[in-house]
Image (cartoon, rainbow, N blue to C red):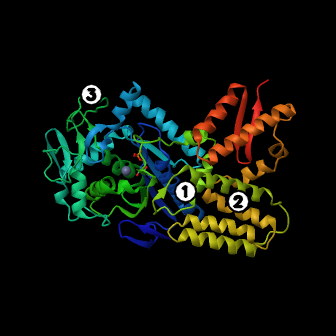
Amino acid sequence: MKIYNSLTRTRDEFIPNEAGKVAMYTCGPTVYHYAHIGNLRSYIMEDVLEKYLSYAGYDVKRVMNITDVGHLTSDADTGEDKMLKGAQREKKTVMEIAKFYTDAFFADCEKLRIKKPEIVEPATGCIPEFIKMIEQLLEKGYAYAAGGNIYFDTSKLEKYYVFNDFNEEDLEVGVRDSVEEDTNKRNKADFVLWFTKSKFEDQELKWESPFGLGYPGWHIECSCIARKHLGEYLDIHCGGIDNAFPHHTNEIAQSESTFGHKWCNYWFHVHHLNTAGGKMSKSKGEFLTVSLLEEKGYDPLCYRLFCLQSHYRKNLVFSWENLDNAAVAYRKLVNRIAALKDEGEMDEAAFAEAKARFCEALDNDMNTSLAVTALYDVFKMKTSDKTKLALIADFDRVLSLDLIAAAAKARKPEAAAPAEADVSDELRAYIEAQIEARRAAKAEKNYAEADRIRVALAEQGITLIDTKEGTRFTVAK
Ligand code: AMP
Ligand code: ZN
């Protein structure tokens, strides 16, 4: 398998440290709010990577952190604490919102069929590990105390900016961006390992440490959580592209300075999901969540298909129209599968040939859109339906679009003839007209009107259910 490695800026052959095994680390969410579908794009693509590595026969051990402390609004150690801000917004404690949004994150993941990593570790559970690494960095001369905080000294490194995609000068500007300068820092790029002093005095979570009562910086948590579960050598580390700098750059600085050797061989970065207005964010514009997609009648797996249809190293633009197209494609795909009958002989040669095409796509820097094409090609094959169904089930181990189960549902007679049988012809005609009006409103992107129709029907006891096969309804007795 060839994979683009941000460290070498080339597509490298993937060779793990230990034959047959993969040590994989993923930066987890900061649990101060719901994940937006941009965050989830990263997790979908990382999920495909993990599943494809397993599919290809590797024994994958994947670790993810949950950031519940230390992440400030600017990744460069300035601004407010995101968790604290979230807690204040909701008048709850930091740990309460951490629990709530961690659960919400995994509920979203489940809807998108993103597998929960084998090990998930919240940062607040690893304070002794952070303290240990910071002590080692101090001992080795890579860290210093200033103004009450402990900083990493980037001038001690031969090369700090390891992801060469970036221009050093731009990065320095990036570090300075929106910053009232932290005069404790010896060098602009230095970053905080342990805070005892920050601009805000109401920090909720603090721990005793040899450096004083305080809390860890964001970057140290990933270095330490990876070390705790995966040791000193990682095969692959993933995250969204915005994490490459400064977060991953700082993780590398900390880990390699502590260990005295190279830490992680492959860096996998997923590019952004944008809206027409630019980068997606939780604070500006419409806050796009999985729940919002569901409220608007979309099956979350349509969004998964939408993501798979494009390459993870390209920015992807989200629009309702694009999602509608993916929803139509998904419905058609399921219906085509539903039309296959589990009949005929298994054709091993045809199976192997199609599987090779699928693997070729994913071996080529995880080209999921070609992998989806390989899935569509199955329908064109001159072979038994049994073979086709076996191929679809096999590919879906990686794509995770729930295709076989969705097709089975679509095949059931009640899918074709919904359980609305006992309403009068007159009422049925009325409801169907409303469903059609709502569909037309959606097609014109008039979501306010579509929502109005749904709510008006609900007030009359008529609930619309959007399914892969179309919209159905129930009527309260
Ligand atoms: P956070 O919860 O902010 O720590 O982000 C969680 C993950 O989502 C990280 O891997 C980010 O790099 C990634 N991410 C943030 N914004 C986007 C976006 N618009 N598109 C794709 N990934 C994103
Ligand atoms: Zn991280």
Q: How many marks?
A: 3
Query: CA–CA distance between discs 2 and 3?
Result: 53 Å
Name which residue lies at 28% across and 43% down. 217
Q: Amino acid at mark 1?
A: Cys
Horizontally, residue 318 falls left or right of residue 373, namely left
Is residue 476 something one can see in this rendering? yes
Q: Amino acid at mark 3?
A: Asp
Q: Is mark 1 within 8 Å of ligand 1?
A: no
Query: Element type at marker 3?
Result: loop
List the residue tagged with mark 3: 202
Name which residue lies at 60% across and 40% down. 296
Query: Element type at marker 1?
Result: helix
Name which residue lies at 44% across and 68% down. 4
Query: CA–CA distance between discs 1 and 2?
Result: 20 Å
Check whether the beta carbons of the residues at disc 2 and disc 3 lie within 8 A of each other.
no
Q: Which mark is residue 307?
A: 1
List the residue tagged with mark 2: 393
User: How far across and down, in percent of the image, does residue 98 sit?
Assistant: 43, 34
